[in-house]
Amino acid sequence: MEAPGSLVGGAILGTLFSDLYARLKRLIHTNRIFKALFKDMISSLDALWPLIRPIVECNNKLEYCSKEELQGLEEVIMEGAQLAQKCLKVSQWIPFKKYKYARKLLKWDEALKRQLDILKVQETRDVKKIALGLHGLDAKMDHMNDMMIHQFFAGSSSSSSHHTALELPQLPTLMVGLDVPLRELKRKLLTDDGVSMLVLTAPGGCGKTTLASMFCQDQEVKDKFGRNIIFVTVSQKGNMDLIVQQLCDHNQRSQVPLFQNEVQASQWLQRYFVEKRHHHPMLLVLDDVWSGSESILGNFQFEMSNYKILVTSRSEFTWFGPSYHLQLLDDGNAMKLFHHYASLGDGSSRIIEELSKKIVKRCNGFPLAITIVGRSLCKKPEEFWRNTEAEWAKGSSILDSETKLFLCLQSSLDALDEDVALVKECFFDLGSFPEDYRIPLATLFDMWAELYGLDDHSKCIANVYELRTRTLANLIDHREVKMEGEDFYDECFVTQHDLLRELAIYHAKFDPVDRRKRVNIEICGNDLPKWWRERKYQPMKARLLSISTDRGFSIEWPNMQVPEAEVLVLNFQTKSYSLPKFVEQMNNLKVIVIAKDDYQSADISNFELLGSSSNLKSVRLEGISIACITRKPMQLSSLKKISLYKCVIGLTFSNEVVKMSDAFPVLEEMNIQECKYLGNLLPEICDLIQLKKLSITDHSDIEALPEEFGNLVNIEVLRLRSCYDLLKLPISIGNLKKLKLLDIFNCISITELPPSIGELSSLRKLNMKWCYKIKKLPLSVLLLDQLEEVICDEATKPYLWDLFSNALRNTRMVAT
């Protein structure tokens, strides 16, 4: 291309154009942050120059042509040059400025388009030539804008929401615009002349996972593949060991193979699928596959008849198979989706058509943005709608691309009223947990009690519901039965869309590292953040510290000073893990979460370092071998709550080195869920005489509780939910005079309640739903004069509790 400006002599526009072009060329080599943006600006100018040059030449040659007609375009180009120069000074470690200038570049793009429209007032002959060029330019500019945004935010998260491994994700209540893509997928994957492998690709938040789930649940697909439909979420940190574990669990295999290399993994997978297929067609869905996971895809690529693979990803894998691009919603479907979420389906909100069309137009068919905006406007007055539309009208369109999706998400946060400002802080806290992680609601409550003084669970749950209402988070509630007023949340989880998690993390980086409220560190291999490697160990003011490492992490922790940190979240994938030594200096630490990010348990060393944390109140361990934490003497003198999830108990506190009552002298609450070999721990639990709450849920290896259970004289809440093999309650349970709630939900093997049940003088709530083998109640239940509520089954209520209804007149019998 001939250098812009060289043919127009001293023309101002040509000179400015040439200067901007040359400056961008230089900046491409000197500024890595905006390199992709600058390259696309160059491409835009390359497309624009052939259109501008004849206009400039015409204005130079024709004396009656007003040079002022190009003044607006000249100002825009001058502004572009100044903006590019300012971008040069932006450091890659200042995300706020990156965000700020990315938005300015988008606005500049819109301004350029407006100036091009003004040029249409030129002479008829020139207007015709320019109009023809502008028609092509608009398409090029739109394509440039999409490419610019995609490259700039190529690191943002994908759109798949969390679901249990190999289970199909739950479909939303309303699905629009997916009928045609569904037919296309069926045509490509079900017909004889179709493909064996297909990559379903689109930006995050467009509905790839939803469409894949619809495909799996379509009747024609189920008729063809039957039970041979396997849905696996790969995710950004996907690894073959975890996928194989999921497949083994799905096929009810107890032995999980270990592979020396990828070849062995691929060979095992091929044998597995051949065995499972049994000459019937098979469909494998690999959901949320990230760029860089090519080796995982390769392990599933082998020759086998009637074997289909559907991949969802934000990236194309052309070497793997052809791509199908999921398009954004058209105007009709976009309006349907907006009406649904703006009115919550009940017509309670007044939908203003004029404003609706303007708002939906600015969402550009992006399903996630339409949902978020619709929910944020639901039940709001007309003035709020008009103000929202007016604010957006000041800038560029909201969702042409992922950058504008971020702007839309940001506007949802900005829309939070001042009186719910704390909800925004709670939203940012969700970014401290790994991608696709189901955040236990109880863990959030522990965090928020220390960070914000929210000791009342009702306030915490209100914040969660506010986030859910605004589609800033999802709430998963697996509780089969809810007792009135109870605060049992061990089966409740919060999940977050990957893009929303990215937004939360992005906000955490707006301040310099040493002044951030939250510090989130994700380490790939041994690659520590530059700021951590180069620090002089100056103290940081973070109150929440989150560190995630992958399987490649193997180095010793460098020093870090976070004296004000109250919450520490550690997520790892290695089989052994050492607590950072700087934990010993975190004197203000109150809540710690340590989670192993797969199915196999891990050993932890340096656990005794927590003994120096004199303010530590809550510990949650996930996927940990508990025996490893009791090898050295320790005492957590302030610990009030400990939660164990999918841990391996084994022979732990039964040794002479550490006794549980010595290690946790003031423990008041203990939650044990889906752990192995719990029976070894039960005698030790009986010595925790300060215990007020005990929850043991989802266990199949406990047949009886020790008689020493009666030693827990201060216990107020006892939950033994889904302890499937538990045959009876100990007689000594009658010693628990302070017990207010007894929950034996789904203890299907219990055949009777002990006569001492009547000695529970403080008992107010009893949940014995799905305890089908209990055929008769002891007469001592008549002594439960404080009993307020009983939950049982419709089938058992007549011959169990109806017999005592006259005597227990103040007791509410709930049969479900």
Image (cartoon, rainbow, N blue to C red):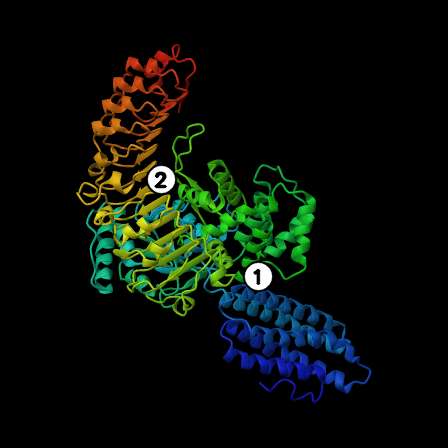
The structure residue drawn at horizontal position 52% and vertical position 47%, both measured from the top left corner, is 471
The structure residue drawn at horizontal position 59% and vertical position 55%, both measured from the top left corner, is 363
Q: Quadrant location of residue 87?
A: bottom right
The residue nearer to you, when weighing 701 against 591, is: 591
Give the position of the C terminus as an image quadrant: top left
Q: Decide if residue 433 is on the left or right side of residue 149.
A: left
Residue 515: image location, x then y, percent = 50, 60
The residue nearer to you, when weighing 364 against 386, is: 386
Q: Quadrant location of residue 261?
A: bottom left
Q: Quadrant location of residue 65?
A: bottom right
Q: Along the polypeptide, which appears first: circle 2 or circle 1?
A: 1
The residue nearer to you, when weighing 23 against 233, is: 23
Can you identify the residue that label 2 sits on? 640
User: Which residue appears farthest toward the top when viewing the image?
Assistant: 806
Callout 1: 10 Å neighbours few (<14), some, many (20+)?
Answer: some
Front tag of 2 and 1? 2
Residue 230: image location, x then y, percent = 32, 50
From this viewpoint, is residue 682 visible? yes
Give the position of the N terminus as an image quadrant: bottom right
Q: CA distance from mark 2 to mark 1?
A: 50 Å
Which secondary structure, mark 1? loop
Residue 648: image location, x then y, percent = 24, 45
Residue 383: image location, x then y, percent = 70, 46
Q: How many circles with numbers are drawn on the protein?
A: 2
The structure residue drawn at horizontal position 25% and vertical position 25%, both measured from the top left corner, is 729
Q: Amino acid at mark 1?
A: Asp
Can you identify the residue that label 1 sits on? 400
